[in-house]
Image (cartoon, helix red, strand yellow):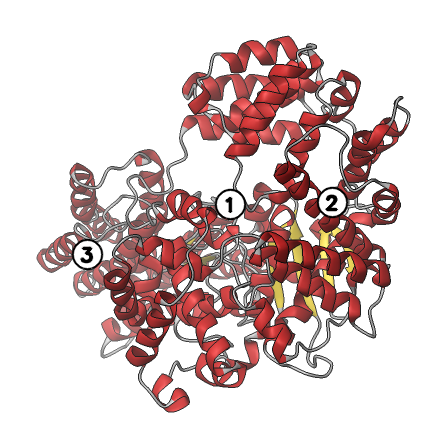
Amino acid sequence: MRRALAAYLVLGLLLAPVPLLNVLQAESAAVVALGAFFISGGAAIRAFESDVASFWGVLGRQEGALLVPLGILLLASLWAPNCTLGQGLLFYALFPGITVVLAVAVAYALQGLPLSRPGWVLGGIGVLVAVGGPLYDLGWHPQFYTYNHVFGGVLGPIYDDQLAVRPGLFAFRGLTLLWALCAGLVGHRLRGRGPRWGVPVCAVAIGVVYLFSVPLGINTSAAALQDQLGGHTRTAHFDLYYDSTQVDAAAAADLAAAHEAQYEWVRTQLELGGSPSGPRIQSYLYPNPDVKGRLTGARTTSVSPVWLSTPQVHLLRSRVEQSLGHELAHVVSRPYGLPGLNASWAPGLIEGWAVALEPPSFAPSPDDLVRTAAQADTSATLAAEAEAIATRLSPWGFWTGRGAVSYATMGSFVGYLLDQYGPDQLKRVYGWGDFESVYGQSLVALAREWAAHLRRGVTVSRDAHDVVTRRFARPSLFERDCPHHVPPARRHYQAAERAARRRDTTEMTAHLTDALAAAPRFAAAHEALARLRLTQGRAGAVRQQLDTLSAAARTVGLQGALGDAHALLGDPGTARSLYATARAQAPGFAHDLRARLMLRATTAQRSDIVQVLTSQDSAEAQARRLAALRPQGTAVRAWRAVRWMDAKRYGRALAEWQRLDSSLPEDRPRGWQRAWALQRTAWGAKAALRAGSTAVARRWAERGLEQARTLGDDRRAAVFAWWTRRAEAPDAVPLGNSSAGRLNHASRLLVQGARTTHEGPLSRQDACTSP
């Protein structure tokens, strides 16, 4: 026992100063379990050399030895706060507690065999199971968790703040105990004890568990995912799987269009001509984090498991617009990755590649974000970032850094390599990261080139400052106090979301009320409760609820909800003021949201319109109700078109946009009218593309391109340029399933800088593709 206790003491002392691992949680429990298999197993091998050693006595002593690292982890809470002690103790019992039972049982069986070195055999079994289990789970199944008899398990991607504790974990640890029982029975039989039927019965029970491993949640198969989701749409290159109860035919067609268009963009950027070869791409779209976590182990993280034989992406349906292009870039990277892994060894290259190849968006580019983060001392800070590129390439350097910073920095660097040297060299360097042989110069030299390029850049927009302020300061999981802790207010809010999906407004109200009792300034809960009350016609209650909040505590959504309440109560002046405040708070690149707030202000005096827009009716039903209102007017028709867009009825929306005047009749500043006109053009171009009216889409996109250039909005100009190319494609087909054609040099220059860090990486919602 002296050796075992000393080994546990060393293990605990090694964990104590390491961020994340010094908190009693799933990660530290897994590390202790990994060490415990070999420590306790080796000690048990030595103990069972004596014929008088009792199995239960040895097991009890080895379980007691686990108190040493447990005590150190509890002591570490003095400098590493732990808000999930109960959950941590559960993981400690499930992981090292059960692993020690297995290790002692295996040692008991091995010591009964005529082996010269039973300790080495036990060590070999431990290594084989610890390595082979994840290879089997992740190599043959579309899942992002792995349960293991030796180290307990990994519950999901590192970017998921909230762990997905699935029933399969408990079933699997029960299976570990079955293996331990079987090994113990073997040891008894080798010593002439116990019933003869014990081992066969135990073996049959183990076989039954493995046979039902998918229903038990121990593994997830592609067939199970497809069966659980239910919906299926097939396109030229994709098989889309989604919740058929949540996605109708129009929404499915819209999703299909987005997949084909963004896939073509990524291929075009890499200059991949001809038709794609290889297997079709599977896209799994989950309705909410609970379903995604239950089925895959990843609650919110978007993932593309490139190591599987079938290319596929997994993401929440609500994140398709932000994350799809990023994940498809991972899919396209497969042929250029390492053999078997289909990815680079360097997470920085993996994620930099995906960020650099994302389709154009309105958000600030990675270049702008990195320049902004440099702030006043640009030269020195960018030089430091250049020196840190090598660190960000490595797994530890990338994952322990702040997600927003790592994604933006590597996206900017890889984007520079793509623009400066072309896609062929980027494809060659991707797998091994051998910059010297591919580019003819060292990584350090290339990083300094990149930093010099950023220093020559133009002044960044205010939007970049806003994003950096909000996102770059977020600590990584390794920097955070109480990792994986979900505060009570957040738990009540999630329960309210589940109640909303069941349409149980009573329970939803109760949970939102509890959330606000726990955190009175919880903006998301305030907004959800306000919106629920608006659907119930309780505008007065909303005004009373939100008037108690200070102006500084009101988010964009809360300002808008309070504006709706005042409009319904017949106070359009106050409503317009609130809508204007909300628009001023909204990010400058959130053009869709800002235009909707313009429309809200324009129709603030029409309580009948606001009543329709705040109802619980579907978007299509609201569009039909708006058509019945009198008088109509430009603003009402604009709202009707917007709601047809939201309902994915793009043909109806396009007809409305084509009949609509270019300006709103209210007396508004010129800048207000120009912003509205540009967003109206964007909506019309998108509706035309989705409806398959390519000639109309091209005219609208060209008009938007000209308007964006006039306003000096390079980000929107890049998006309109992409839409123009899509509409010009000779084989363009309805619903956006078109080949965008290959960008010529002029078009490539036009869209340079359009590569952006989408909301996913900035909020650490998109995972690295390496296992």
Q: Amino acid at mark 1?
A: Arg
| Mark 1 secondary-structure assignment | loop
Looking at the image, is 516 positioned above or below residue 642? above
Q: Quadrant of residue 636?
A: top right
User: First in sequence: mark 2 or mark 3?
Assistant: 3
> Which quadrant of the figure has residue 75?
top left
Q: Which residue is mark 2?
A: 680
Mark 1 = which residue?
A: 166
Q: CA–CA distance between discs 2 and 3?
A: 82 Å
Q: Is residue 683 visible?
A: yes
- Tell me the kind of residue under disc 3: Ala
How far across and down, in percent of the image, does residue 450 sit?
Answer: 37, 72
Residue 608 % position (x, y) = 79, 18
State the image coordinates of residue 299 (x, y, percent, origin top left). Answer: 52, 47
Q: Is residue 735 left or right of residue 500?
A: right
Judge whether residue 182 can be spotted in this image. no
For residue 763, side relative to residue 262 (left or right): left
Camera-side residue of 112 and 318: 318
Give the Cα distance between marks 2 and 1: 46 Å
Q: Relative to the observer, which residue lies in front, 282 or 207?
A: 282
Q: Residues within 10 Å of mark 2 (few under 14, many from 20)?
A: many
* Image disc number at residue 53: 3
Q: Residue at x 40, y 87 (%)?
A: 439
Q: Nearer the viewer, mark 2 or mark 1?
A: 2
Q: Nearer the viewer, mark 2 or mark 3?
A: 2
Query: What residue lies at 30% left-to-right and 80% top-to-bottom?
Result: 445
Q: In the displayed structure, would residue 174 be above or below residue 278?
A: above
**Is the residue marked by circle 3 packed among few (<14), some (14-19), or many (20+) residues within 10 Å?**
few
Q: Quadrant of the C terminus?
A: bottom left
Quadrant location of the N terminus?
A: bottom left
